[in-house]
Image: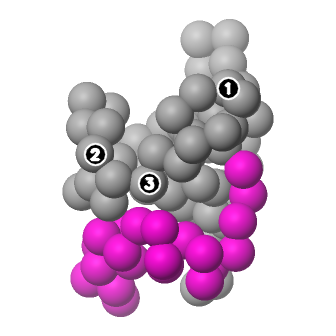
Amino acid sequence: MRGFRFFEEYTNATKAQSAGNVIAVQTSDDPFVKEGEICVHALCAYPDDCAPNSPVLARLCSAEYLGRHCERITEARARAVHPKLFEYLDSLA
């Protein structure tokens, strides 16, 4: 899917166990600084919902969070991990 990079979320910084959700970072927008953090526009699971394959919403995501709690993955892996993300993306098209 063009226009996004996909990052699998993990339950902690050791990245030992997948949280079952994916963050889709929009590549069309440049990162920017907000409140001292480098941020990107992204689609991700609701912050209070820790269940795998959670519903998604658009929000800002910290680049530091991506580096500490996520790993970049392929679109195929992202589709397998977080189908609801792609239901949302497909509804935008």
Task: Name the amino acid type tagged 1.
Answer: Ala
Residue most extreme to the top: 36
Q: What secondary structure predominates along the stretch shown in magenta?
A: helix
Identify which amino acid the numbered label 2 is placed on: Ala
What's under tag 3, amino acid-wise? Answer: Asn
Q: Residues within 10 Å of mark 3 (few under 14, many from 20)?
A: many
Choose between 10 and 39: the one closer to the eye.
10
User: Which stretch did the figure color magenta?
Assistant: 71-93
Please determine whether, in this image, residue 56 is positioned above or below residue 14: below
Disc 3 versus disc 1: distance between alpha carbons? 15 Å
Quarter-of-image position of residue 92: bottom left
Residue 81 located within the stretch drawn in magenta: yes
Q: Is residue 11 visible?
A: yes
The residue wearing badge 1 is 13
- Residue 66 can be seen, yes or no: no
| Left or right placement of residue 85 versus residue 23 in this view | left
Q: Residue 62 at what x, y percent from top left? A: 61, 30
Q: Residue at x 70, y 65 (%)?
A: 73
Which residue is labeled 2 in the image? Answer: 51
Residue beneath disc 3: 21
The mark tally for this picture is: 3
The residue lying at 41 percent from left, 67 percent from top is: 82
In percent of width and height, residue 78 lies at 55, 71
For the residue carrying disc 2, how many other residues have a C-alpha within 10 Å: few (<14), some (14-19), or many (20+)? few
Local SS, label 1: loop
Q: Are marks 3 and 1 in contact (CB under 8 Å)?
A: no
Q: CA distance from mark 2 to mark 3?
A: 8 Å
Q: Residue at x 43, y 54 (%)?
A: 20
Residue 83: percent from left, percent from top:
36, 75
Q: Is residue 27 above or below residue 88?
A: above
| Sequence-wise first label, 3 or 1 | 1
